[in-house]
Amino acid sequence: MTTTPQNVERREPAQVMRLSRLGSFHQCRLSFMRQLTRRMAAEKWVFSRPVFDIDTNGVGHAVYSAQGPDRTYSLVAFAHDLPPEQRSDRVIAEAWDATFALFDGVPSKDDIQRLSRNVPLQEAGRVSESELSLSRANRSVRLWAHVVDRLAAGQQPDLAQIHKVGYLMRTTAVYGSGKFGAADREKIADRPEVSGPFQAEMLSVYLTRIFVRDLVQHMAKAKGGEQTAQLDPNIARWLGIGNSTGLGMAPFIVNHPILFNNWIMAREEAIARVRSVETATDAEKAMFREIFERSKLSITWWQSEHPIQIEKLVALSADLNTIAAYLDQTDLTKNQPWDQLILWSQTALSEEGQELLASLILEPYGELVDGLSSCMADGNSAAFAIDGAMPVNQVRELIRTNFGWALDLDWYAAEHCARAWYVSEEKLEPRLGERFDEPIADYEQPLAPARDAARAFDALDNWSGEAPVAEFLLRHPEHRHTVRRTQMSHVAPYGEIRDNTIGAEVMPIDMLRAKLSFFGATHFDPRSDRWVRICMYAGAPYPEELGPDNADLWVYPELAQ
């Protein structure tokens, strides 16, 4: 007797939206960098370097253009001779090794002149709606010197050192969406090539990586002259772009519940679709096994100095051995094998290992899941409007559904409200302070949706369940943002973090990693509970080698033959 296969449902928000799990996410097929490289290869984008005017001291500017089917985008890069004492990854820095703007089109000489007066200043300058992003980067000093010195001496750099660090430069910010005069998101939202989340920013980083490769080669030639070696493409491919990300990014996922929901829902739908596959072919099984082995190699390169991540890496290493043993004993072709694998992982592995597996099972099924990338942007502006006619009882029920776990907490107890989010006056960047040790409560930002939901729930208890919520809000406008978020859950069930964002135990790096995993970042290295270093595009093909065959799985290193 045969049984009818069951479609597997998406995992429940209550399971997925815990901070510890969000802080264990890995890149996957839907990651924004991979979406971009797939598109560029499929559409046969053409790349050029019309300007490279940089002197022997490494000072000057360059332009890199990427031409798609309909439009051209250009990175305008400025290289600087930065004294070591001025080099800092902190957002309060005022000078950098390189600064960049992504230009909408091909810049004229006048455009470059205008940008040269503003882009190196970053926040202190201003760009225009012709620019889609503004960014800056600093060298990884020791690896930069190593690569320059080895090439100048006619030798190749040590690949082990490259794997250990992963990048020659790391960005400390990539600003877009209207900051400092740049174009608003609405300008590009209907362009297919950049309509997805952060596609303009991912393009900026991809072009930055090309510039950094060319610049280090240029500086080696300036030092070594004719004996200088050309950087081996197989080594250059493992030079990504680093990124230092702090608290400025953490509130994003709280402030954009529908957008973040769309990211999570797309990933969860992809996982559910693959788990629902009744039988896997030998080719799909073989591909999964190969990607798993390649992923294991990548993880051996993952280093961290932070105790929390070190502990997670120890657990992940044990998970890899556990997974390998399971795969050796299991038929991955029959009886919804991927569902069996995920169900097994939920009790056998750490959250880090569970989420790695959830990403890896998508790899053989591009045709089944890649189309979900078109669902990840937020075009639902209507959801921002409050439905004032909704009865109070319905609002309370929505709050209970999304924040039931928070309703019984004592929100006046120190451990539940120990922290407060505020914006620094100096840099206008989010910060997280100690509520009872610092005079910041009066400046608190609305980044504690669980506490606010509990307060709104209590306030609504005194109102008739049949009354329209508009009547309540006329008397209590302080709860408008909570009612809005609650109503958004109709279309955004994954829009709310199911944890306390102001508690004594909150780990902001979990929020950072959740967002960065969707970028496609790898090798997360927290430097505290509030900032993290990552690597982007390590392993990705450069334009001259980019094609359909290598546009996607580059994130996993090839195994030695």
Image (cartoon, rainbow, N blue to C red):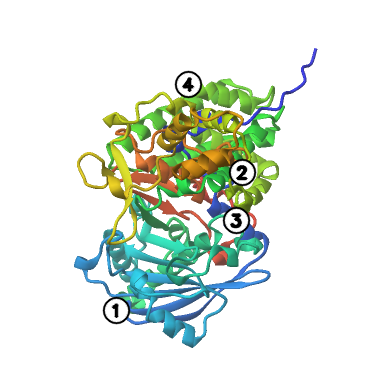
- 433, 79: nearer the viewer: 433
Q: Which residue is mark 4?
A: 348
Residue under the image location 45 percent in, 29 percent down: 458
- Label 4 secondary element: helix
Cβ–Cβ below 8 Å for labels 3 and 1?
no
Residue 57, numbered circle: 1
Q: Are marks 4 and 2 in contact (CB under 8 Å)?
A: no
Q: Nearer the viewer, mark 4 or mark 2?
A: 2
User: Mark 2 highlights which residue?
Assistant: 387
Q: Looking at the image, do the residues carrying marks 1 and 4 touch, with CB atoms under 8 Å apart?
A: no
Residue type at the position of mark 4: Ala
What amino acid does circle 2 point to? Asp
The part of the image, by quadrant, that contains residue 341 is top right
Instruction: Of the two numbered discs 1 and 2 on the same chain, state the one appearing first in sequence.
Output: 1
> Is residue 205 visible to us here?
yes
Give the CA separation, mark 1 to mark 2: 61 Å
> Badge 3: few (under 14), some or many (20 or more) residues near its Cα, within 10 Å?
many
Tell me how far mark 1 sits from mark 4, CA to CA: 55 Å
